[in-house]
Image: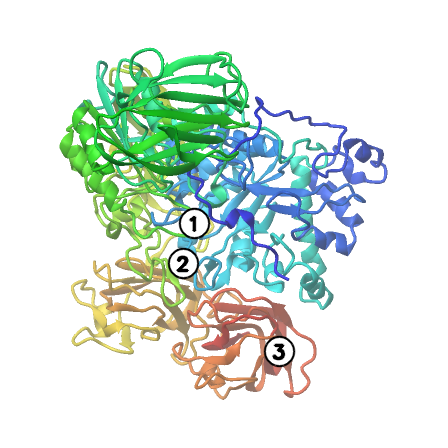
Amino acid sequence: MNAPPRPEKRLRSHRRRAKARGRTLGVALTALALLLGSGAVAVTERAAAAADQPWMNTAQTPADRASELLAAMTQAEKLAMMHGGQACGYVGCVDGNSRLGIPPLHLQDGPVGAGDGFTNVTQLPAPVAGAASWDTSLMNQYGQVLGSEQWGKGTNVVLAPTINIVRDPQWGRAFESFGEDPYLAGQMGAADIQGIQSQGPMAQVKHYAVYNQETNRNNITDNAIVSDRTEREIYLPAFETSVKQGGADSAMCSYSAVNGAFACENGPLQKTALKGDMGFTGFITSDWGATHSTVASANNGLDMEMPGSDYYGAALTTAVGNGQVSQATIDDHVRRILTSMFKAGLFDHAQTGTTGSVVTSTAHNTTAKQVAQEGSVLLKNTGAILPVAAGTSSIAVIGDDAGTDAMSQGGGSAAVNGPYLVTPYQGIKSRAGSGVSVSYSQGTASSSGALPPVDSAYLTPSSGTGAGLTASYYNNTGLTGTPVLTRNESTVDDVWGGASPGPGVNATDWSAKWTGTLHPPVSGTYQLSLTSDDGSRVYVNGQLIVNNWANQSSTTRTGSVTLTAGQAATVEVDYYNGGGASNATFGWSIPGQTLHDQAVAAARAAKVAVVFVSNFESEGGDLNGIDLSAAQNTLVADVAAANPNTVVVVNSGSAVTMPWVSAVKGVVEAWYPGQEDGNAIASLLFGDTNFSGKLPVTFPTALSQGPTNSTAQWPGQNGQVQYSEGLKVGYRWYDSQNLTPLFPFGFGLSYTTFSYANLSVGQPDANGSVAVGFDVTNSGSRAGAEVPQVYVGQPGSVGEPPKNLRGFTRISLNAGQTQHVAITLDARSFQFWNNGWTNAAGTNTVYVGSSSRDIRLTGTTTVAGGGTGGGTTQTALPRTGWTATASSTGGGDVPANMLDGNAGTRWSSGAPMANGQSFTLDMGAAKSIDQVVMDSGGSASDYARGYQVFTSADGTNFGSAVATGTGSGAQVTATFPATTARYVKVVQTGTSTSWWSIAELNVFTDGSTGTGGTGGTGAVLPRTGWTATASSTGGGDVPANMLDGNAGTRWSSGVPMANGQSFTLDLGAAKTFSKLVMDSGGSASDYARGYQVFTSADGTNFGSAVATGTGSGAQVTATFPATTARYVKVVQTGTSTSWWSITEANLYN
């Protein structure tokens, strides 16, 4: 039986707040409680058992305690730690163990607050707003709010933060992330993690890795084809920072498939990179339902399946029993989980909080407001339209997003039910004060049906004078007895947020009645609406028109009534609050006046018009473009035509286009600002707070201007998503292509100005670090904050984008104040990935600026060769005597042109790129090589979409690929371990309507000696006389194709992979070998999910397996002690809907 779907993944818009029952200030956390907390074992019981449970000795290290506990566990108890358990009120649960004193694990969303329907929690701004603050201290504070509230709710594993890179602004979860740059994402993520974990729970950094779109997620067709270098430089660094700097206790593997293997069973990602190179000692949990296998997942690094036990329950017990998963592997998984739990103190501090606890507080609300303020970005301010000038007599607030449907948050597992929402209209009206006329016009249709509030000009109170209605408040929910407060109010449009509405009135369990006269300006049928939490209703001339009388979260209902101009109608609006949050809005639509026309008229009558526009992002789906709705764009254009003093505020999760940008004076990007939306934006528009936010993503002029502008790249085709832009993600793309975006990465204006001077750039110290110093002066007339950004441009020969962000800080300066800024760039700032981190030897340029395009200071430093990667000092080989051939040629574009030293000539394929096209280079004699560079001579469309590089000593036996990758741009570089060969063959594995062309081909060496094989494990065996047979065959994909030297042909099983499928090689005579390489020719889904390798002298008696493993990606390598045999048999032990296929099979001695 499949586990139930994860609640966090059910998409919800949550555009308004949900019901919150009861409020207190803060949350009581008792570290050493004498009570059972959320099923945890009581501290007193643990202390009494300490003699029998040595792992309860807190003087020992977490690792030692975990080892002691592990030794006391039965196999069943170990396996129970590796999967989801019984339902416990949280989105993920691992059962506790009372015998051993192991507390349960309660996992809960999410990155914006305690989600999944929890109430009495704080709705923070979206993480992208935190990233836009570029304030790591504030992000740490953000994390503390998350950690504190989750711990107070009984959660001990917080499913946050989301640190994936925004590769394309259409991504549905861009708002959850920290933007397009890995350095920025890493710094903000680490600060968030430290904040979360400082409050008790473990953070679970997600989603590891290469998770950048929702389309086809959790499906093998969402198969990211990405080079190792691109992974290491773009998509993995934020995780490395989260581990090494943030100290993340756990990680969540993603729904993505990466180079043919699902992330949660991807050995190169989980075992090699995360647990190996990054030194991650925590545990990896699958995203909900992202586990797709038992053996492959367990052997490739997945520690815990969520939310159930489909693969890590009985199936894992069986796999251990039959030897497919070793006991050592199980012990490593469980040890990691236990060590993290000990490290977090879960054994030593019982939680007293429950899912019903009230955990929001005034302090947390203040943090929410500060993040919304610091994260808002001023993009345009022509004529100093902002801040709103003192003495401004009237302001028209326009847009559905400014009213009760304010876009305060995104959806999915990041949605949070906040206790209240201050709308932009309410915030602006409150800040403007009674001396300023503030009108509200909806402008476009509301998804909820809410209409603009009835203006006081059309209302007369039942008592007293002036405009508006008479309000009577009662300290009961039934409008009975004597009112405790009576006063006249201009309209019914209030958010009390669970607080008392006025002197003498309860904070909860109260009611109110507004009475007076409604004066219709025209004759016709009027639409009326009531939005409330809890109940509301409206009577006109004694007739019930709208009945919204229910105990509920904020809900809108509508009705209609026919009125005659000049004939006043009595009106009564009733409301009650039954506890928790509270709000009420009475709205209408005047006949014959569209919402659009009303908004334009209001703008024309006002001194300043502020238009709010938005889009909505959510997990589970990507956007279809980045344009706002046509209705919103038209509204902005028409308002701007009616009022020259128009400001636009955008609430979005990532970049949007702005076709009206030249027609308006001011533009603000405020993201999804959370529950303090209106208060935060009002403080900025009126200048109470200065703008200081900087864009964490580039805003293009159009979607087509960005790096992922082909279907193959987004959302993918033919079961693959080509990451062919390589390193050119975000601003790197715009820089490399010399494109001018609408607004660049790192950009943001202020109400003051800043100047930069006195740059100093040191030389690398013994650790490779470089000290950078400069002065920043507030050259304007008011205090403000600036974010100086430091970028590094490496030598062009290493193939990096023009510059990469390597450092930043946020400083606050009074008018006229100067501060010296010191930033240390670590050694990684001057390195690139080349099978290891390799120094970019030579002159490196250091850029200091206010944005990626506003560079104020430039300096240089000289970096020596070195690092852990290959090719630290690359030398191009002389090409004298070299020749080239190709599988096809376009007219006079002959292969020899690749070697003539003339970048104006080229070889071309003469036909659109297709799988199997190739060229072969004969260097005349064996050379030691480790890099091939294919230069398309400035043509940015003719590069190989995918490639494999093979080498050979004789031009016939090429063995397995020494390099596999995807091209990007006019120069494609393939690096590989040093090998000695005479022939180099490059095979195209991608497709494109463009021809494949190369102007110049060069081969490089770093001076080391190659072995003639791959990975330095020996030479490839000649395959002359070899034959192959198989248990099944798919059509013409015969076994002999594995041995024909043509990567364009293959053997395939002809049916989906199943346990017991096999193929056998007959080498013709006994050979000695120690490695078998099975190459799927660029098909990243056809690899053996699990395999066993057997050898035999006679083809009958095969004995025990010499190698057992799980495949991952387009090339599967099995190594084993050197053996001598004539026959080699490979048996499939995994399952998949894909066929098993091999283009080339090679053995090495």
| Foreground: disc 2 or disc 3 | 3
| Foreground: disc 3 or disc 1 | 3
Q: Which residue is denoted by mark 1 in the rendering?
A: 235
Tell me the CA gap for discs 2 and 3.
31 Å
Question: Looking at the picture, how far across and down is residue 847, in whole percent?
Answer: 29, 35
Of 904 and 852, which appears nearest the observer? 852
N-term-proximal mark, 3 vs 1? 1
Mark 1: few/some/many CA within 10 Å (<14, 14-19, 20+): many
Q: Is residue 1061 left or right of residue 182?
A: right
Question: Looking at the picture, how far across and down is residue 661, in whole percent?
Answer: 19, 37
Q: Please tell me which residue is depicted at 63% across the width and 52% down the height of the picture.
A: 304
**Amino acid type, callout 2:** Val
Q: Which residue is denoted by mark 2 in the rendering?
A: 226
Query: Where, quadrant-wise, is the C terminus in this rendering?
Result: bottom right
Q: How is the image coloured?
A: rainbow
Give the answer, above or below, for where 1052 lies relative to 835: below
Mark number, residue 180: none
Q: Secondary structure at mark 2?
A: loop
Question: Looking at the picture, how far across and down is residue 314, in whole percent?
Answer: 70, 62
**Amino acid type, callout 1:** Tyr
- Observer able to see residue 785: no
